[in-house]
Image: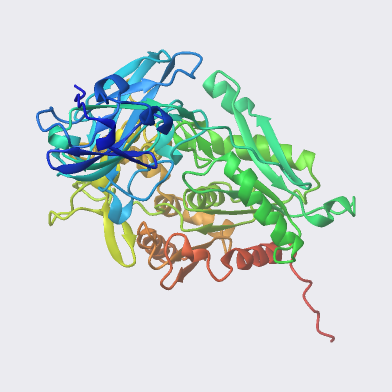
């Protein structure tokens, strides 16, 4: 229940959007969700119940912290989605709260609830104790906090955070709050996140191709999309053909990010002479399940086949490409790094070479910690010594565990999170029609049948089973780079893959950049070095012939 407090106007002060008033010998601050300052100046009496604002920590007799979330009257129709409430320490002013990561993982507590057909102006009574990470809100100590609500309309928050169409409340300051006795406060969903606007410069084009293979799998039109960046000389000499770079992004990126940022960067590098003249096809690998990584999957569909059988021929019919193996080049980072490694290993007769950077686990004997090939299988959350399996490493120190990540992801949404994304690619389909989970999200116990199915996507295992066939095809064609301090310990899996390659006498190049993490690995112009190496494969210099 809202607390009711009546005081005279002269006893309170308004500072910015915060009302200061006396309460039990102390000054309490009230942050209004939707009041304007001129409303307060005209009041002689203040009744918090009737105006719908909250005194932070004022009601010592109230029950545990609860929320009444109202859909703003500005919405034109009922809304549905996953309602998220973020609750954390009071910080400097910001428009939006986001989940914690690394050392800050458990600073932001998150509660969730699915809601359906909520009419504008209607309220949702929200108990933040039922589906919550890391613990029920009322268990937090007395302190200064802030809170925000967000309605994830498209159920994709777990992939990349808030997206166009989502609706959020303001971030509300709650100084001096006792969550155990705070009672109910109201949050209003007022701000709909707008569509991203971007303008493609000349020489940068959007490609949208409907795949027959994927459409047949899903029973509806499925689009393969990319941003194509043409070299500055493309429109000058209309007879020249060019090598083609097939690039794809890491987890959390989308087509709008490629179009608004990555494409422009590639164009500028070519214009400045830092990249050789090539056609860049910047592939979008995001999907409802996370990233499909261009792997054929019983859950996502035949993305690998669709790429090599349909999309690459389409690109080569539309643009002046060299249209030959040595001029089809691959590079990508993180999940994109795994994708281009996968494509080179599985389609070595199509692509000339691959430069994966910081790829997702490439040898499942170390899936960022747990060995998925050993018997008996380990617990996904706990090492044999009882310590948590670390996921995130920052400045040489482990700061976030697999258990924290998986349980946080479970609250953010069942679709699109990192572990869910792996399951959409690697797992068999369950009886409910969805990917089977690798492990129990509460206990960390791994399902042996699912782990066995994942072996089909273990790149090291593919090399072992097909070494004689792949050895000549991959000779000098893979150039993997990762930092020795990779944020997600991906250097450990890469080293096991290197051991496998050496045992099989396969010529695969591995580069470990000292002291670099998942992102800083690109420092010192790694991308430009890769572009130059690509050019050398596609445009080998004529070898000098010695005179007799």
Q: Residue at left 57%, top 19%?
A: 220
User: Between 160 and 346, which is closer to the camera in this rendering?
Assistant: 160
Q: Is residue 508 visible?
A: no
Res 124 → quadrant: top left
User: Between 207 and 543, which is closer to the camera in this rendering?
Assistant: 207
Give left or right: position of 344 versus 241.
Answer: left
Give left or right: position of 529 versus 376.
Answer: right
Give left or right: position of 124 versus 80.
Answer: left
Horizontal and vertical percent position of residue 184:
22, 26
Horizontal and vertical percent position of residue 28:
22, 40
Q: Residue at left 63%, top 25%?
A: 212
Q: Is residue 98 visible?
A: yes
Whether residue 521 is situated above or below residue 58 in the rendered picture: below
Whether residue 409 is situated above or below residue 272 in the rendered picture: above
| Residue found farthest to the left | 61
User: Between 234 and 1, which is closer to the camera in this rendering?
Assistant: 1
Q: Residue at left 62%, top 50%?
A: 261
Horizontal and vertical percent position of residue 158:
39, 37
User: Between 74 and 86, which is closer to the camera in this rendering?
Assistant: 74
Quadrant where the image shows the C terminus:
bottom right
Whether residue 121 is situated above or below residue 25 in the rendered picture: above
Instruction: Report the label total.
Output: 0
Q: Residue at left 79%, top 79%?
A: 544
| Residue found farthest to the bottom | 548
Q: How is the image coloured?
A: rainbow
Whether residue 507 is situated above or below residue 354 in the rendered picture: below
Horizontal and vertical percent position of residue 8:
24, 30
Quadrant where the image shows the N terminus:
top left
Res 141 → quadrant: top left
């Amino acid at each position: 229940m809202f607390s009711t407090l009546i005081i005279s106007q002269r006893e309170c002060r308004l500072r910015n959007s915060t009302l200061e008033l006396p309460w039990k010998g102390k000054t309490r601050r009230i942050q209004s969700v939707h009041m304007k300052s001129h409303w307060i100046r005209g009041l002689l009496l203040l009744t918090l119940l009737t105006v719908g604002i909250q005194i932070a920590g004022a009601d010592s007799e109230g029950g545990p912290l609860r929320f009444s979330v109202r859909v703003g009257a500005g919405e034109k129709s009922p809304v549905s989605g996953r309602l998220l409430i973020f609750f954390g320490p009071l910080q400097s002013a910001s428009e939006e709260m986001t989940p914690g990561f690394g050392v800050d993982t458990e600073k932001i507590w998150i509660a969730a609830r699915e809601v359906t057909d909520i009419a504008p102006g209607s309220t949702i009574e929200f108990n933040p104790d039922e589906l919550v990470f890391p613990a029920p809100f009322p268990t937090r100590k007395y302190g200064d906090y802030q809170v925000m609500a967000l309605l994830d309309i498209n159920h994709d928050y777990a992939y990349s955070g808030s997206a166009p169409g989502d609706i959020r409340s303001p971030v509300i300051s709650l100084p001096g709050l006792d969550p155990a006795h705070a009672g109910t406060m109201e949050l209003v969903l007022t701000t709909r996140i707008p569509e991203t606007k971007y303008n493609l410069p000349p020489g940068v084009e959007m490609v949208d191709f409907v795949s027959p293979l994927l459409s047949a799998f899903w029973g509806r039109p499925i689009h393969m999309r990319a941003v194509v960046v043409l070299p500055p000389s493309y429109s000058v000499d209309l007879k020249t053909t060019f090598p083609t770079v097939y690039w794809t992004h890491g987890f959390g990126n989308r087509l709008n990010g490629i179009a608004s940022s990555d494409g422009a960067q590639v164009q500028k590098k070519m214009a400045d002479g830092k990249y050789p003249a090539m056609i860049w096809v910047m592939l979008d690998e995001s999907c409802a399940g996370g990233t499909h990584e261009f792997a054929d999957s019983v859950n996502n569909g035949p993305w690998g086949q669709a790429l090599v059988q349909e999309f690459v021929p389409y690109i080569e019919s539309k643009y002046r490409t060299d249209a030959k193996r040595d001029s089809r080049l691959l590079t990508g980072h993180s999940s994109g790094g795994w994708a281009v490694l996968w494509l080179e290993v599985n389609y070595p007769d199509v692509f000339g070479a691959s430069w994966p950077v910081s790829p997702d686990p490439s040898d499942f004997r170390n899936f960022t910690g747990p060995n998925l090939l050993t018997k008996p299988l380990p617990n996904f959350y706990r090492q044999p010594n009882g310590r948590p399996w670390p996921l995130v490493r920052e400045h040489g120190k482990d700061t976030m565990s697999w258990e924290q990540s998986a349980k946080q992801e479970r609250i953010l949404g069942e679709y699109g999170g990192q572990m869910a994304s792996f399951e959409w690619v690697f797992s068999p389909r369950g009886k409910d029609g969805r990917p089977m989970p690798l492990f129990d999200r509460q206990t960390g116990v791994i399902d042996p049948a699912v782990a066995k199915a994942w072996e089909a996507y273990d790149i090291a295992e593919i090399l072992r089973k097909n070494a004689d066939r792949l050895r000549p095809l991959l000779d000098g064609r893979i150039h993997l780079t990762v930092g020795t301090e990779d944020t997600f310990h991906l250097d450990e899996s890469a080293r096991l893959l290197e051991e496998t390659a050496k045992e099989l006498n396969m010529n695969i190049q591995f580069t470990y950049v000292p002291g670099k993490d998942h992102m800083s690995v690109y420092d010192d112009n790694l991308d430009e070095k890769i572009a130059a190496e690509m050019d050398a494969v596609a445009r080998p210099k004529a070898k000098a012939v010695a005179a007799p």
